[in-house]
Image (tube, grey):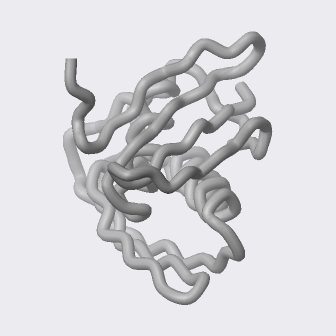
């Protein structure tokens, strides 16, 4: 079976949760990682109202970018009670700017405490980018 151009799948991990994520470019990888994290947590969203927000952050490498971005998404889920379904992400010179659109969180199946650097890799491949991410739960 051929792998989709972008996506995510849960990977077995002894104590925590892990995801393998892939996409044709770095912004798409970030989006798939966020979608995968929301799916792992079993987040259910309300159907309205639509909410929008902006995320800006700086980073020094791809691994730091991924961890900081996902931890920012966790912040929005936990503190602002919002989960996102649309991501418009731009990257340049160690800066990320993202416009995000989503909905209020109705329920969370299992809380994710943090995105970790444990075993974290963001690799460039012939098809784009791949990452392996471990979540502390």
For the residue pair 79 and 34, the one nearer the viewer reads as: 34
Q: Residue furthest front?
A: 126
User: Which quadrant, please, contains the C terminus?
Assistant: top right
Residue at image position (42%, 25%) is: 9
The correct choice, above or below, for 106 with respect to 14 in the image is: below
Q: Residue at x 75, y 42 (%)?
A: 116
Q: Is residue 118 above or below residue 70?
A: above
Determine whether, in the image, residue 69 is placed left or right of residue 87: right
Work out whether residue 42 can be spotted. no
Q: Horizontally, is 137 left or right of 124 in the view?
A: right
Position of residue 102 measured from the top left corner of the image (x, y, whole percent): 31, 53
x then y, percent, for residue 6: 29, 43
Q: Quadrant of the N terminus?
A: top left
Residue 56, quarter of picture: bottom right
Q: Is residue 97 visible?
A: yes
Front residue of this view, candidates 66 and 22: 22
- Residue 24 percent across, percent down from the top left: 31, 55
Q: Quadrant of residue 114?
A: top right
Percent coordinates x, y for residue 50 in the rendering: 24, 57
Q: Is residue 107 above or below residue 127?
A: above
Q: Residue at x 60, y 13 (%)?
A: 12
């Amino acid at each position: 079976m051929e792998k989709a151009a972008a996506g995510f799948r849960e990977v077995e991990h002894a104590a925590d949760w892990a995801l393998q994520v892939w996409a044709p470019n770095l912004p798409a990888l970030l989006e798939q990682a966020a979608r995968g994290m929301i799916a792992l947590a079993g987040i259910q969203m309300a159907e309205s109202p639509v909410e929008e927000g902006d995320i800006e952050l700086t980073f020094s490498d791809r691994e730091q970018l991924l961890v900081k971005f996902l931890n920012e998404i966790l912040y929005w889920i936990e503190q602002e009670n919002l989960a996102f379904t649309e991501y418009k992400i731009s990257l340049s010179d160690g800066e990320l700017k993202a416009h995000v659109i989503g909905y209020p969180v109705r329920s969370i199946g299992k809380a994710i405490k943090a995105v970790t650097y444990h075993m974290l890799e963001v690799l460039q491949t012939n098809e784009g980018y791949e990452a392996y991410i471990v979540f502390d739960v």
